[in-house]
Image (cartoon, grey):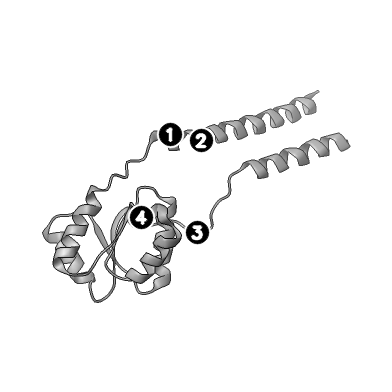
Amino acid sequence: MKLKYFILVSAVLVLFLGVSSVSAHGADLTEDTMIIANESNGILAKSIVDNNSFDIKVYKFVSEGDVEHQLEHALTNPNKRILAIAYQDTVNDYLKEHPELKDRVIVGEDDNGSITNNAQKLLLINVGGSSNDFIMPLGVGLVIGAIIGLICGVFIMKRKS
């Protein structure tokens, strides 16, 4: 009887340790290509994006914390491209801590020419993800599923006999 409990506890422990950690960070509901703006330059950025038919969304942020939160999403989403025309100090500080974002985050001024040029640069950034990003989670899921299936199968067969 103790052997059954030991096996069950061991299996549960392996499953908990085998499952990758889930971030409680929350879902990212913003577009992958975006401009970080504030109240004073959001309308200007939106009009420039619309006039040039750029496929970029403009988001108005009201605090540095919200901007940092968005940059955290960029760390986990390799397809996210950001042009920051507001909160430049916050974005620059964040880029110093996370230099891997420098190729996908542009810090620019909030005048017509700068927004237009940087928006064009933003759209030219290649963020095409590779298909190998799916292989690792698939493999881990198959292994965990096989282990759970084997354990459940052994318990079911033992109960039948």
N-terminal label among 3 and 4: 3
Instruction: Left or right? Give the position of 12 relative to 5.
Output: left
As drawn, which residue projects farthest toward the bottom?
Answer: 40
Cβ atoms under marks 1 and 4 closer than 8 Å: no
Foreground label between 4 and 2: 4
As drawn, which residue projects farthest toward the left?
Answer: 51
Tell me how far mark 1 sits from mark 3, CA to CA: 24 Å
**Amino acid residing under circle 3:** His
N-terminal label among 1 and 4: 4
Which residue occupies 45% across, 61% down?
97
Cβ atoms under marks 2 and 1 closer than 8 Å: yes
Instruction: Left or right? Give the position of 139 relative to 28.
Output: right
Residue nearer the viewer, 95 or 33: 95
Residue at the spot of label 2: 136
Foreground label between 3 and 2: 2
Please say if 128 is above or below 29: above
**Amino acid residing under circle 2:** Met
Residue at the spot of label 1: 132
Q: Residues within 10 Å of mark 3 (few under 14, many from 20)?
A: few
Tell me how far mark 2 sits from mark 1, CA to CA: 7 Å
Q: Tell me the SS state at disc 3.
A: loop
Foreground label between 1 and 4: 4
Spot occupied by residue 89 in the image (x, y as percentages of width and height): 36, 71
Residue at the spot of label 4: 102
